[in-house]
Image: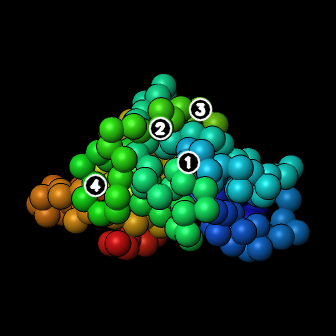
Amino acid sequence: MFNRKIIYIDCGGHIGQTIKRFQDMTRGMSNVEIHSFEPHPRLYPIIKQYSNENTFVYDKAVWKEDGHVDFYLDVLDEVEGSGWNHPGQGSTTSKDKSTGTLDREHPHRATSIDLNKWIMDNFNKEDFIHVKLDIEGGEYDVLPNMIKGGSIDYIDEFDIEFHSHKIGLDEKVHNDLLNELRVATKGRNINVRTH
């Protein structure tokens, strides 16, 4: 594996916990790139500090198409000094998310990237690619696009947090996507969590 280019893709960078973990794991290695996506207007400036010669931080939402997408913030996220210690904790592209206190009337208009296209445009199947996907319900839009578009074949490891119960998704739809993902990844390492 270490003769291959190693790519860590962090979808839902939050406050940089995963970037820090990836940087610590790969310290001293020269063939590593870390890419982190975080569209939250209060969190992006926090994680931008982790940028360096092999760590790239993007003020963009991971999505199924390039352009813009409504990004719903918790109402407490918008209030400096609100006492809310977890800004961005529940921010989402899913207007149907039932947890948190989302401001559905005034979404942040985030720049979005088509994750499927971005992976295929920037990497190749010989690279070792690990994807962490924690996007608060958006995974039900992004993953089918990756399967259909073909970038799923580039991924060696997935760390996915599913949020079906938070967006009111039917259990059958969730299970069908999990089965489709297992078939598409052909036995590669998938770590799945439900939050």
Q: Residue flagged by tag 3: what amino acid is it? A: Asp
Secondary structure of the residue carrying numbered label 1: loop
Query: Crowding at label 3, few (<14), some or many (≥20) Cα neighbours within 10 Å?
Result: few
Hey, which quadrant is residue 173 in on the image? bottom left
Residue at left 51%, top 42%? 61
- Is label 3 or label 2 in front? 2
Say which mark, if any, is on residue 137.
none
> What is the distance, in whole Å, between disc 2 and disc 1 at their CAs?
8 Å
Label 3 sits on residue: 121
Label 4 sits on residue: 97
Label 2 sits on residue: 108
Q: Is 50 placed left or right of 9 in the picture?
A: right
Residue farthest top in this picture: 67
- Residue 162 lies, in percent from the top left, at 34, 64
> What is the distance, in whole Å, between disc 3 and disc 1 at their CAs?
25 Å
Residue at left 29%, top 63%? 99
- Is label 4 or label 2 in front? 2
Residue 159 in view in this figure: yes
Which mark is first along the chain, 1 or 2?
A: 1
Label 1 sits on residue: 40
Which mark is first along the chain, 1 or 3?
A: 1
